[in-house]
Amino acid sequence: MTGHPSRGSETRQYPEVRPDPPARSRGVIALVEENCTVCMLCARECPDWCVYVDSHKETLPAPDGGRPRARNVLDRFAIDFSLCMYCGICIEVCPFDALFWSPEFEYAEYDVRDLLHEKERLGEWAPTVPPPPAHEIGAERPKEMTTGSRPAPAGRPRPAGTSAAAPAVPAVSPEPAAQGARPEPPEDSAGPAAAPLRPPAQERTERRAPRPMRDVRSIRPPGSLPKRSPGTEKDES
C-alpha cells in the first residue's frame, strides 16, 4: 500500500503485514441468523439476484390454550459473491438487522463456485463486524431513544379566559311551541346573531305558485306514428 507521494512510500508487506481497513469498508456481508424473519426483502431488492433464501412454516402451540400460530423457519440463506456488486441494498432494506458489513476481505478462492457462501459461512463473519461508531457531540438523539423516553402527553391546554367548568345548557321550556311559530333567539345572548331559520314546509308550499297542468293526451308516446288525416285514408272496400 503506497500513501501520498509527498510523505514518502508506505509500502506494507502483505500478507506478512496485514492492512487495517476502515470500519465502514465493504469487505463481506455477515449474517445474524437469529434476526432473520424470512421477509424476502433482501432477495427481492437485490439487483444481481445473488441472494437465495429458502424456508418452511412451523405451527407453534399458543400459550394458555389460544389459537396456534405459524412462523417461518430459515432453511437456507446464501449469497453468491461472484455475482455480488457490493451495493449494500440488501443490508439497507433489512428491517430486522440481520445483515451487516464486515471489513474482512480475505476470502479469495481458486474456484469461482466456492464464492457461494451459505448461512454457516456467512455466520462466521458476524463476530468480525465492528461496533457502530459513537454519535457526534451535539447531534440529535435517535428516534428510537427519544420515542421511548418521551413523557405521556398531557391534556390539551384551554384557551385563555375560559373556565374549567362545563358550559351550562339552556333550559327548555316544557310548553310545546305553536305549530308554525319560529323560535326567537334570547335577548341576552352575547354571541353572534343566529342565522334566520327556514320557514316550515307548510308555509313554503303556500307561497309556491301552482304549476300548470298539461294534458297528457296531447303528448305523443315515444315510438308511435302520427295519425293520418281523413282524406289520406284508403278505402278498405
Image: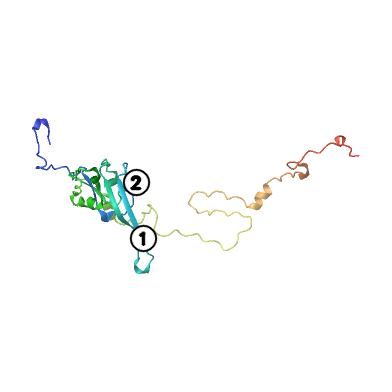
Answer with mark 1 or mark 2, whichever residue precedes in sequence. 2
Residue 194: which disc?
none
Is residue 93 visible in this depiction of the protein? no
Q: Nearer the viewer, residue 210 or 51?
A: 51
Q: What residue sits 26% from the left and 54% below the top? A: 33
Q: Position of residue 27 (x, y in %)?
A: 20, 43
Q: Which residue is mark 1?
A: 70
- For disc 2, the marked residue is 44
Evaluate whether residue 40 shows in this view. Answer: yes
Q: Position of residue 101 (x, y in %)?
A: 22, 46
Quadrant where the image shows the C terminus: top right
Q: Amino acid at mark 1?
A: Ala
Between the C-alphas of marks 1 and 2, the distance is 23 Å
Report the amino acid beneath label 2: Arg
For the view shown, which residue lies furthest in the left direction? 8
- Secondary structure, mark 2, is helix
Q: Residue 227 falls in which quadrant of the image?
A: top right
The residue lying at 68 percent from left, 49 percent from top is 206
